[in-house]
Image (cartoon, grey):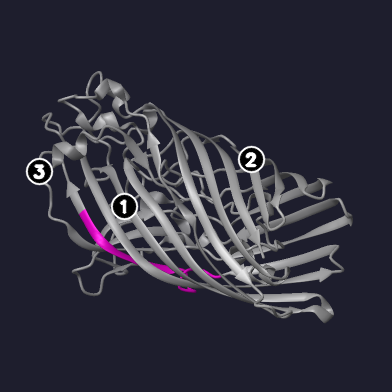
Amino acid sequence: MTAALLGAREARASGLSTARFGGEHGHVTTDNPTAIYYNPAGIALKPGTRIFVDGSFAARWVSYDRPESAISSMTGTPEGATDANAGTAKLSNFIAGPFAGASSDFGTKFFSAGAAVYFPFGGQSTWKPNDKYRGSQDYPGAVDGVQRWHTIDGKLRSMYITGAVAFNIAKIGLSIGLSGSAIRSEIDTIRARNSDGTDDLVLSDGTLKEGRSWLKASGWQGSFGIGAIWNWRDKLWIGASYTSRPNITGNMTLKGELTNAFGVAPVSDATPIELTQRLPDIVRFGFRVRPVPKLELRLFGDFTNWKVMDKQCVLDASIEGRKCDFAGGDTALTKPEEFGAEGEGTKGVTQHIPRFWKPAGGVRFGASYWVVEAVELFAGLGFDSSAVPVQTIEPALLDSNKMTFSLGGRFRLHQRLHLGVTFTDIAYFKVDTKGRNVLNKFQAPTKQASADGVYKQNIFLTNIYLDVNF
């Protein structure tokens, strides 16, 4: 099994993706069933019953240039093998994300309800292999690319099953809504790993040292959402919503197993583990206005409290009293050499991955124009800030400030059927860590291989939906 783990033909990575359900019609003041996610008050804005089927299809390109200075070796790099740990890793892949939902007012004028299934977080990526080391007997793991110390093969996915209710107080033009979600989260990932946190290929005597770590975990969580939209004469809509953290507090515990293969040692038996992490809550706000019947303008934004994502921790589930409270988190990024050792607040820690993410926000402007009643054309422009600091950025979960550019249209195919298509380019700003990444400066068991380098990324997203009204 060790040889199989080291000889993977392709390198893959998992990461978080941003939900774009509904394209330019997915926002905090929308009136279609994607409101179940963005703002549950929106399902009360239109009468009747609606069925909404949506697909987002993303083509993603990433490159990671790892310099020689990032090599985190204790035994030294073997002669002629520098490019096993330094150089450029690239990926190009295709990811799809579905949304299916329905809502109805059940013939009333004041009450609506709906339900939806969707995947707002998750993804999987395929990195190109380092062909020089394909079939290598000396350094077999190097075929998986220079990014392998943080990601080789994996997926990270959260499925939401959401129900919502909304009330329309027509006399004052106010709609209010409430939603509740059951969340199924899954992680399945393999990465290169040495027990001492280095990226050594071999021991000092030339024996193979590079290993692999395979983690699988899953679990259920719950969350809620609340929102309101004020409508003035069907000309102005102002909305705001709040989506809670998973399990309200944000604390998530996924249960599973961890398998390690270090160097030439036998593959370890799968160890029962718990993976703990926290995901954020989200505040959305915005408005849309129709100054004339054929023109609509939209401005909306969001604030996501990624500060709660301070770490991901893998704990041995067989140890009673296990915990992952590392002291010194406030100064970990400025004094990394003093952070990450086990102490009174830790017990049973198998792997500790520091994140120390920061709050992030975004704003988008959009406009629609009705060429004829059955044809709406639209465009959008937006900016989103990064949640990931350069000190802890790495190829598995990377982010940067980004601009979005959208074009599309909504077309009436039948009196009760509409087709929407949005094309969006997400242009990420280049990130150059300039030697500031500190992952290899932490103490064990927190220490990892350095992820210094230059990151580039671009995503082209196509969103297509069918909206049925009756």
Residue 216 drawn above or below residue 146: below
Q: Residue furthest front?
A: 414
Outermost residue toward the right in this view: 292
Q: Nearer the viewer, residue 296 or 157?
A: 296
Identified at 20% across, 30% down, the residue is 140
SS category of the residue bearing label 1: strand
Where residue 417 sits, quadrant-wise, is: bottom right
Q: Name the residue under label 3.
A: 265
In the visual, does 89 lie left or right of 316? Answer: right
Task: For marks 2 and 3, give the one nearer the viewer.
Answer: 2
Please provide the residue range marked out in magenta: 244-258
Q: Are marks 2 and 3 in contact (CB under 8 Å)?
A: no
Q: Which disc is residue 188 wearing?
A: 1
Mark 1–mark 3 distance (CA, rounded to whole Å): 23 Å
Specify which label sits upstream in the sequence, 2 or 3: 3
Q: Which of 229/72 is in front?
A: 229
